[in-house]
Image (cartoon, rainbow, N blue to C red):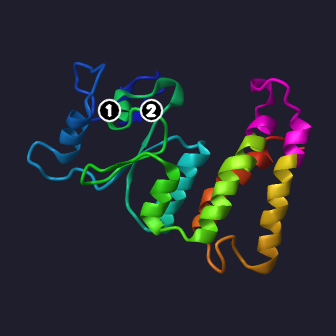
Amino acid sequence: MACNSNGTTSGFFISACGAFFVSRQEVWQELRGVDGQNRLMHTLFSFRRCPYAMRARLALRLANIEVQIQEIELRNRPPELYAVSTKGTVPVLVLDDGTVIDESLEIVKWAMGVDEHAIGLVTEGDGEFKNDLDRYKYSTRYEDTDPVKSRSSGSKFLFKLNDILTKCACLSGDRFGAADICIAPFVRQFRIADMQ
C-alpha cells in the first residue's frame, strides 16, 4: 500500500471497487495470497518522521530483518492499518505468520532483544524526557507550559546520556544497540525543535 499525492491509497489491500472497511482476516488473506503462499515476509506500517517508527526501522535494519515498509499518511490512515491494530498508530509490524506487534519497544525486543540497562534508560527516555520534549517542542498544545523550563529539564537527560558516552562508544556499550536505537530518534527531535 502506498499513499498517492492526492491522498488516496493504492495497493493490493484495496480492491478496484474501493474498500471503506477491511477486516484483519481480509488483510491476512491478501498477505498470504489465494494459493496460501506468502507474498511478503514481514510488513511494517510506518511514518517516516515518527520517532517510534524510526526506532522500529532502525532495530529491524540493525538486526538485518527484511520487511516491506508500508508508509502511511497520519492524516489519512488507511483501513488496513486499523484492521491489524485498532489503535491506528505506527509502528505496527505484521509478521509473516500473522502476529501483530504494535508497540515500538516490543518491535525492538523482538528484533534484537533488550538488556536491563537498556530498559532502564529507554524507560527514562520514554517517560520524563519525552514529557519534557513534548512541552518544549509543542508548547502551544499544553496549558501553562514554559518551553524554556521544559528544555532545561529535558537537557538533564541529555547530560546523563553524554556522561555515559564519555565512558563507552555507545549507550548500549561498545556497539550501537537497543538503547541507542530507542533513544536516538527523540534526541533528534529535541535537537530540531529549535535549531538556534
**117 vs 136, nearest the viewer:** 117
Q: Is residue 21 covered in magenta?
A: no
Splitting the image into 4 quarters, where does residue 163 fall?
bottom right
Residue 13 badge: none
Splitting the image into 4 quarters, where does residue 133 fall?
top right
In screen coordinates, is 149 left or right of 65?
A: right
Q: Residue at x 59, y 42 (%)?
A: 50
Callout 2: 10 Å neighbours few (<14), some, many (20+)?
A: some
Q: Please, which residue is most extreme toward the left here?
A: 35
Q: Earlier in the sequence, mark 1 or mark 2?
A: 1
Q: Is residue 139 covered in magenta?
A: yes
In screen coordinates, is 158 left or right of 33?
A: right
Callout 1: 10 Å neighbours few (<14), some, many (20+)?
A: some
Picture coordinates of residue 80, whole percent (x, y): 33, 32
**1 vs 45, nearest the viewer:** 45
Picture coordinates of residue 32, whole percent (x, y): 18, 47
- 167 shown above or below 35: below
In screen coordinates, is 122 left or right of 99?
A: right
Q: Residue at x 79, y 79 (%)?
A: 167
User: Which residue lies under the disc numbered 2?
Assistant: 88
Picture coordinates of residue 186, whole percent (x, y): 69, 50
- 63 shown above or below 70: below
Q: Residue at x 78, y 43 (%)?
A: 132
Which element type, helix, strand or loop, lies under badge 2? loop
Q: Bounds of the magenta span?
A: 134-152
Measure the alpha-carbon separation of dots 1 and 2: 9 Å
User: Which residue lies under the disc numbered 1?
Assistant: 83
Three-letter amino acid code at the position of disc 1: Ala
Picture coordinates of residue 196, whole percent (x, y): 90, 44
Three-letter amino acid code at the position of disc 2: Gly
The quarter of the picture where the N terminus appears is top left
Which element type, helix, strand or loop, lies under badge 1? helix
